[in-house]
Amino acid sequence: MSTNFVALELDMIKQWLKKVAGLAASTVVEPRLPQSKSFLKILGVPYWGNNSSLPITQAQVKSVIANTPIFKGVMLASRSHIMKASPSSDMSVIWIDIWDSQKGSKGKTLINCSFNFGCHTATVRGIAMHPGVVQYCNCWH
């Protein structure tokens, strides 16, 4: 498949499914290409919300991402995770997972990009895949 015609071909597959199976348009799920996840972190965002003693929320992060042009067409694969950069810092690190192509082209495009998060300038950085917690056999007796 040529990448210029992928969207057209996926639409043709959807139309064919509707025609052959006699299904309503709302019944046919959008066909999608195989995807993987890219793991990113956002730096430069204050931990405390605007004029508030409450930390920023996942809803605020999701809203900013949805309304920022560099994230156009990017879909979060899971909820964002927000934590303080250090115990004494008032800045946060926001961890996000996005759905990406198998080559990771969306993630690569976002890495080192800056955007406005309120009145602050945030920067996107790439991170390694989440390896999980190491579990030793001796711990599970």
Image (cartoon, helix red, strand yellow):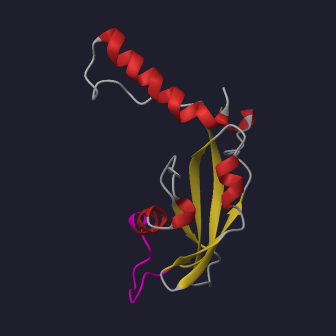
x and y, in percent, of residue 54 in the image: 40, 80
Q: Position of residue 71 (x, y in %)?
A: 54, 60
Number of labels in the image equals 0
Residue at the spot 41% in from the left edge and 65% down from the top edge:
63
Residue 136 x/y as whole percent? 74, 37
Q: Note whether 41 is above or below 134 in the view shown.
A: below
Decide whether residue 34 is among the magenta residues: no
Give the position of the C terminus as an image quadrant: top right
- Residue drawn at the location 62% of the way across and 84% of the way down: 88
Quadrant position of residue 116: bottom right
Residue 48 sits inside the magenta stretch: yes
Q: In the displayed structure, would residue 52 be above or below residue 16?
A: below
The majority secondary structure of the magenta stretch comes to loop
Looking at this rendering, what residue extends furthest in the top direction?
Answer: 20
| Residue 31 visible to the viewer | no
21 vs 115, nearest the viewer: 21
Work out which quarter of the rendered image holds the N terminus and state it: top right
User: At which x and y percent is residue 132?
Assistant: 67, 45
| 85 vs 4, nearest the viewer | 4
Q: Is the residue 124 above or below the residue 119 in the image?
A: above
x 38%, y 27%: residue: 29
Q: Toward which corner of the image does residue 19 lie, by quadrant? A: top left
Question: Given the current orientation, which residue lies at the most extreme bottom position?
Answer: 51
Q: Is residue 98 left or right of residue 59?
A: right
Q: Is residue 69 visible?
A: yes
Magenta segment, which residues? 47-59
